Amino acid sequence: LAKTTQPISMDSYEGQEVNITCSHNNIATNDYITWYQQFPSQGPRFIIQGYKTKVTNEVASLFIPADRKSSTLSLPRVSLSDTAVYYCLVGGPNTGNQFYFGTGTSLTVIP
Amino acid sequence: GAGVSQSPSNKVTEKGKDVELRCDPISGHTALYWYRQSLGQGLEFLIYFQGNSAPDKSGLPSDRFSAERTGGSVSTLTIQRTQQEDSAVYLCASGKGGGSNTGELFFGEGSRLTVL
């Protein structure tokens, strides 16, 4: 099972771009990389998923280098409402479908 | 319903009592997960169901915890003889199963359990 390592916390000012990097050195060949956002008293919410290179949607971008041993979630021009915990998840059907969440990164956006 | 539904949303019980938590996944999703989240902590994997196959119970913390999934749909997590350390939010998630299970999971709002 691929373990993930993320920074415990980050602060950013409103309007800035925020990049959160996750390390997953023992990612398996068929594993996907998925990021979630969690607000207090709510369940985690899917943000973005990728396998390799770059993925972009209306919320974020996900950058994955060629060796896939890390990934970076990029949030453009954050607002106060982006204050949340962000989790990186690695896994897939060929590694038992067990998806382990780490401790996540607590992002605080400052006015 | 459109999303994952969990009940009860809040449960307060006395130490030693049994509790049941229910999860109704998104229709058509064959994968179902239970996680536990203690205050200020990350999510702890408990159990994983895939269709009607035998569940992966490797995350259950003790034999006081058990879960069932009837007809490949609704799931119940049972905690027997509750202890104060069982106090947490119990989150259920569902997703496409089998070879399509890449980690895109849909979570319910959770059941907050408080053991006095």
Image (cartoon, helix red, strand yellow):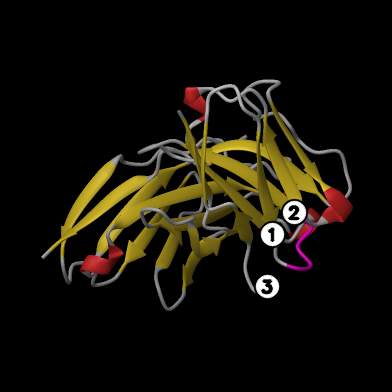
Within 10 angstroms of label 2, few (less than 14), some, or many (20 or more) residues?
many
Side of B64 where B50 appears, left or right: right
* In the depicted structure, whether residue A109 falls above or below residue A31: below
Residue A14 lies, in percent from the top left, at 16, 68
Tell which of B46 and A34 is nearer to you.
B46
Q: CA–CA distance between discs 2 and 1?
A: 5 Å
**Magenta segment main secondary structure:** loop
Look at label 2 and name its amino acid. Ala
* In the depicted structure, whether residue B95 falls above or below residue B37: below
* In the depicted structure, whether residue A28 falls above or below residue A50: above
The residue tagged 2 is B31
Mark found first going from the N terminus, 2 or 1: 2
Q: Quadrant for residue A73, please give it.
A: bottom left
The residue tagged 3 is B1
Query: Is residue A11 something that shows in the picture?
Result: yes
What segment carries the magenta color?
Answer: B27-31
Side of A18 where A48 appears, left or right: right
- The reply to whether dot 3 and dot 2 touch (C-beta < 8 Å) is no
Q: Quadrant for residue A84, please give it.
A: bottom left
Q: Secondary structure at mark 3?
A: loop
Q: CA–CA distance between discs 1 and 3?
A: 15 Å
Query: Do the residues indicated by labels 1 and 3 lie within the same chain of the protein?
Result: yes
**What residue lies at 34% left-to-right and 63% top-to-bottom?**
A74
Q: Secondary structure at mark 1?
A: strand
Look at label 1 and name its amino acid. Gly
Mark found first going from the N terminus, 1 or 3: 3
| Chain of the residue under label 3 | B
**What residue lies at 53% left-to-right and 22% top-to-bottom?**
B83
Residue B37, numbered label: none
Mark found first going from the N terminus, 3 or 2: 3
The residue tagged 1 is B95
